[in-house]
Image: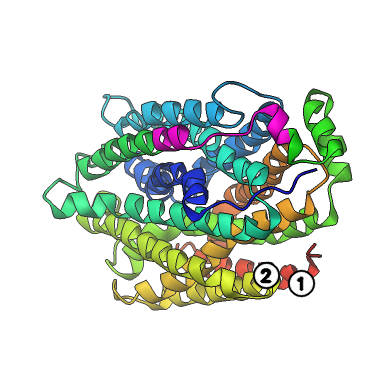
Amino acid sequence: MKQKPNLSFWKLWNLSFGFFGVQIAYSLQNANISRIFATLGADPHTLSFFWILPPLMGMLVQPIIGTLSDRTWTRFGRRIPYLFVGAALAVLVMFLLPNAGSFGLTVGMALWFGACALMLLDTSINLAMQPFKMMVGDMVNEEQKSKAYSIQSFLCNAGGLVGFVFPYFFTAIGIANTAPEGVVPDSVIYSFYIGAIILILCVIYTTLKVREWPPKEYAEYNSTESTEKTEGAEKANWFVLLKNAPATFWQVALVQFFCWAAFLYMWNYTTGTIGDTVWNTVDVKSKGYQDAGDWTGIVFGVQTLGAVLWAMVLPQFRNMKMAYAFSLVLGGIGFAMIPFISNQYVLFLPYLLIGCAWAAMLAMPFALVTNALQGYGHMGAYLGLFNCAICIPQIVAALLGGTILSLVGSHQYNMMFVSAVSLVIGAACVKTIKNK
């Protein structure tokens, strides 16, 4: 078996550049879904139920894409065909979703239309996102893998920064951030339109610049056992794969459970939290609430900026587990600070700290898991299954969100304390990981 060659910085960059566009779509979804559904008429105690759809679709789609792409060989590549189809579908849905309240539907029908559009959007985003992780696993050697995932994390967060600030930017240049009752403001609608255009352009760039290895060359850089397993992927059983998964797979999944539950509550309740603590309103029809919605994008952008900067620091840690745990603790401190802050600009500090946790969550788990999976074969299937460690905690958190909100006093800012505790527990669980 030949050693995978070292890749230049720009080859590593091109391998993940399309992630920039995908993350714009993902960040627009995360920052605006609660705002969109609240505007359409959803109650805060049922709002979290709409957040079941994105991780549910991710859990269903990504293992299937991983397994199918393991045995796909075309003139366009192995993973890239799935990437391109997902991006094209995402563009279509991004033109539909923000218009859910503009078609003259009843409140109930508008919510159902929005839910179906959200389901399709997250399906397509997952379809486009997973191939980037798989291509790094396929083509990058162990020495460069942490660097490759850090570059991917940087591009992911840079794209997130752009997507998060779009609604605020369009409001600042004069596009309305208020609309008739039940209608999504134009600033949000235009953000989705521009994000869709950038997404497809970035994906086209990656498809033109990246040449995946054909089967013969792929076999030269992978062990015989791994290649035989990959070529026999159609015989693979997911339950068998999970039974034979390395211990690291499950240990990292435990950490992921607490991390992604924390961030689900951040995405779900930040607009209501900021509206309450900064603009002193929870009325979705008020300008203050819509201003809080715009500012949600800004603080998420600050979080992303913190993640971009921290992603450059992470490779400097000699101990990956220490970097992982420390980052999560910083994020927990950030969450605990939010309910005490009434100045919109002071909110930048806790969200910078949360960005440290986000950077580690994007880079460290996949570096740890792909290292542990060497020689196991079925890399795409395993990474698709590992995505369940991202999706299941979000589904559980979404199902329990309304109940927990009632238990902590119905003020949405109290959910930030729940996120803080969850991240600290995740940091403690890092100790259990056996790093290869």
**Is residue 351 found left or right of 394 in the rendered image?**
left
Look at mark 1 in the image and give the residue it sits on.
Answer: 431
Q: Is residue 292 above or below residue 88?
A: below
Q: Please name whichever residue, 385 or 113, is drawn nearer the observer in this view of the structure.
A: 385
**What percent of the width, then of the height, locates residue 206?**
45, 38
Inspect the magenta stretch and tell me whether residue 211 lies in it. Answer: yes
Residues packed near mark 2 inside 10 Å, few (<14), some (14 to 19) or many (20 plus): some
Determine whether label 1 and label 2 are within 8 Å by CB.
Answer: no
- Seen at 68% across and 52% down, the residue is 141
- Seen at 46% across and 77% down, the residue is 337
- Seen at 87% across and 36% down, the residue is 240
Q: Amino acid at mark 1?
A: Lys
Q: Which quadrant of the figure contains the C terminus? A: bottom right
Q: How is the image coloured?
A: rainbow
Q: Is residue 288 above or below residue 12?
A: below
Numbered tag placed on residue 218 in the rendering:
none
**What percent of the width, then of the height, locates residue 176?**
15, 46
Q: Please name whichever residue, 143 or 409, is drawn nearer the observer in this view of the structure.
A: 143
Q: Please name whichever residue, 193 or 337, is drawn nearer the observer in this view of the structure.
A: 193
Q: Which callout, 1 or 2, points at the residue further toward the start of the chain?
A: 2
Residues packed near mark 1 inside 10 Å, few (<14), some (14 to 19) or many (20 plus): some
| Disc 2 element | helix
**What percent of the width, then of the height, locates residue 123?**
53, 32
Q: CA distance from mark 1 to mark 2?
A: 11 Å
Numbered tag placed on residue 320 in the rendering:
2
**What percent of the width, then of the height, locates residue 45?**
49, 50
Q: Amino acid at mark 2?
A: Met
Q: Which quadrant of the figure contains the N terminus? A: top right
Inspect the magenta stretch and tell me whether residue 370 lies in it. Answer: no
Task: Give the residues drawn in magenta, as a range.
Answer: 203-218
Q: Nearer the viewer, mark 1 or mark 2?
A: 2
